[in-house]
Amino acid sequence: MRCAYVDLDGTLLGPGASLVRGADGRWSSLGVRALEACWRADVEVVVYSGRRQSSVFESSRLIGSSSYIFELGSGIVLDGELEWLTDGVVPTDTAGSIYEQIEASGAPALLLERFAGRLEYHTPWSRGREVSHLFRGSVDLVEVGRLLNDAGLGWLRLVDNGVVRAVAEQMPGLDIVHAYHLVPAGASKARAVARHMQARGYVRSECIEVGDSREDMDAAAVVGSFWLVANAVERDVTLADELTRHPGVRVASEPYGAGVYEAVVTTLAEG
């Protein structure tokens, strides 16, 4: 193993986005031990997230990593060099940020109107973003895709980035609330991981990925081994159906950082 791609929220980070909290809210150093195991084995760790660049940069710097992937794969930073993976939709002085360009397209307003009561901005995390419009709710992504295409907005897609658990972030009438990102259609975590592998010269068998959402699982097609942390299936039982589309996905017996540790040490031992 030469590289481990690790999601932040709901994966490496435990409840409250803490690196040192386990599923029960108590102190756990297993996420840190996973990072240490990678360091001792000379395995690069690359964090990826739906968070904005500045937030992922700070998390990456905190663990001593020189590369990271942000905003659902919209951008990658490799040894300090930023590369957009948004198929030409980039920030400009005239059009503004990618977030502003998406807003100007009318797509966010269209989705909020069509899915009123089922979709809303995921405040406060939706504020101050550079690329994606972040929502919470429960919608049919196929229906959303048709709506965007029919409106001439096929250059955008809505991505399911996992279940929202915080009590204050639930919505009336919805049993399960998901976090959704509206991003340029070409952006994806899988594409960003593949780009980093290409830049580093890694081959598929040398890389693993650990995550907790459907969007994360799509990267199973580009890495040698993909691990889903246990809490992902516990909080969203419908993910079990997705496993049939990704037969190579392994489900850790442990949640959060403990699951990352399990994935790392198991892969190192098998290697």
Image: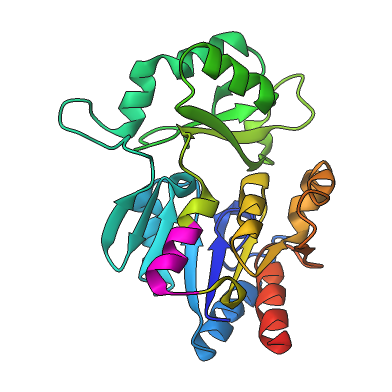
Q: Position of residue 9 (x, y in %)?
A: 58, 53
The answer to whether one can see residue 269 in this image is: yes
Magenta residue check for 55? no
Residue drawn at x 16%, y 26% as measured from the top left: 94
Task: Specify whether 4 is left or right of 192.
Answer: right
Q: Is 99 placed above or below 201 here?
A: above
Q: Say which residue appears at 46% left-offset and 14% top-offset.
A: 152
Residue 198 falls within the magenta-colored stretch: yes
Q: Is residue 75 above or below residue 271?
A: above
Chief SS of the magenta region: helix
The residue stretch that appears in magenta: 193-202
Image quadrant containing the C terminus:
bottom right
**In the image: residue 45, left or right of residue 116:** left
- To which quarter of the image does residue 98 belong? top left
Percent position of residue 194, x then y: 49, 60
Front residue (pair 160, 244)? 244
* Residue positioned most to the left: 93
Q: How many marks?
A: 0
Quadrant location of residue 6? bottom right
